[in-house]
Image (cartoon, grey):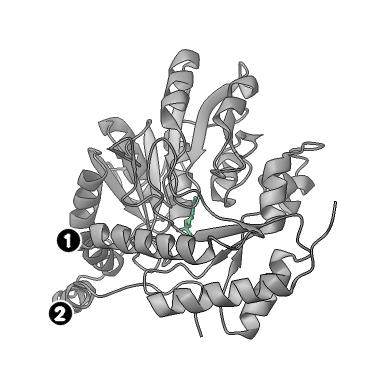
Amino acid sequence: MIPVNTPLLDGNEKKYLLECIETQWISSEGPFVKRFEDQFAATVGRKHGIACANGSGALDIAVAAAGIGPGDEVILPTFTIISPAASIVRAGGVPVLVDSDPNTWNMRVQAIEQKITSKTKAILVVHIYGLPVEMDAILALAERHNLIVIEDAAEMHGQTHRDRPCGSFGLISTFSFYPNKHVTCGEGGMVVCDDDRIAERCRKLRNLCFEPERRFVHHELGWNYRMTNMQAAVGLAQLEKLPQHVQRKREMGLRYQQRLADASEIQLPLTRNDAAENIYWVFGIVISDAVALTPEDLAAGLAKRKIGTRPFFWPMHQQPIFESMGLFQGQSFPVAERLARRGLYLPSGLGIKNNEIDEVCDAVKSILSGASRIDG
Ligand SMILES: *Cc1c(COP(=O)(O)O)cnc(C)c1O
């Protein structure tokens, strides 16, 4: 069996976890939480880190702390996980979508400006699958139109954008520590920012909006998105290995690139764009329209050989839940729609072995070569 993701826990994870148990510090009050927050913030060049329960919760906090409220429009890509759009909708904001670039799979930066209205409050950038969004243009646009930038850097641990860390752009950035990210704590997330007041706001929102004057008396609603000392212990051990993790991911990606280079039926991820070399959060492929094979067919063929895959994201404008809320009616974003219908990703976890990558590539090519081509 080659699972779609196998984490790598070969550092101080066990030692730090044992420390939690031996010291009996297991809750969010434990000392690893602050250590992890401080070290993580320093790694991405931010003043503050606010650890939380998961990356989706980090986005809820970031969107609320940025002051997104009823009627505020927030521009984001349609091709992403649902979390950022869900955070905007729950805050009462209005998600405004842009299509993807067919090569980087990131949001089309040139499509943003025409979406700006008098109600636009923020741009929520989501870096997709390992290549950063072109930030220079976005920061310039945000400055010109006085917009907040929120950066969802969940897939960008250890990635840089022209030598500046991803997660250091805009007012607030968020990360996830789900087991398929380059740094995991099982479940976990982090909000990072530079502004002291925003950081304080995030800490309050994370902790049910308890007030210092009288605990259990509340003036507003927050969440319990606290991270446990045990999660932080694992996270800290993972963070110590981040450079090795990024290096291993790049090796993995390049091995896939080399072994799949002759498969003309599929589009591979770009090895780099103008801002960075790919860190391959996942190794995605897009099947050519000329091949009579869907990603579901390929996934089924690989599953028969005990190889796990995941489909690509499903665009926000075609989410049944948003449709039922009356959002995005009649909108179409052809690039994202095609990526969703022709893409999938291959086993890309940090724990994958080179011989397993080779086995996956052989299986992919064998299945593709058996598929017929659609002419014309
Ligand atoms: C993983 C991910 C999230 C969500 O993180 P969770 O920890 O699973 O809630 C959010 N945004 C992006 C871009 C992600 O890849």
Residue type, mark 1 in image: Pro
Give above or below for 213 relative to 367: above
Graded by Cα atoms within 10 Å as few (under 14), some (14 to 19) or many (20 or more), the crowding at tag 2 reads few
Q: Residue 22 has which mark?
A: 2
- The residue sitting at the right extreme is 376
The residue to which callout 1 is attached is 31
Q: Residue at x 33, y 61 (%)?
A: 183
83 horizontally vs 24: left or right? right
Q: Position of residue 90 (x, y in %)?
A: 59, 43
Q: Is mark 1 within 8 Å of ligand 1?
A: no
Q: Is mark 2 within 8 Å of ligand 1?
A: no
Camera-side residue: 293 or 170?
Answer: 293
Q: Residue at x 51, y 30 (%)?
A: 123
Measured Cα–Cα span from mark 2 to mark 1: 13 Å
Q: Residue at x 34, y 66 (%)?
A: 185
Is label 1 in a helix, a strand or a loop? Answer: helix
Q: Position of residue 121 (x, y in %)?
A: 53, 24
Residue 222, visible in the rendered structure: no
Residue type, mark 2 in image: Glu
Give above or below for 256 relative to 51: below
Q: Position of residue 301 (x, y in %)?
A: 67, 78
Q: Position of residue 130 (x, y in %)?
A: 44, 51
Is label 2 in a helix, a strand or a loop? Answer: helix
Give above or below for 261 relative to 317: below
Q: Residue at x 53, y 43 (%)?
A: 104
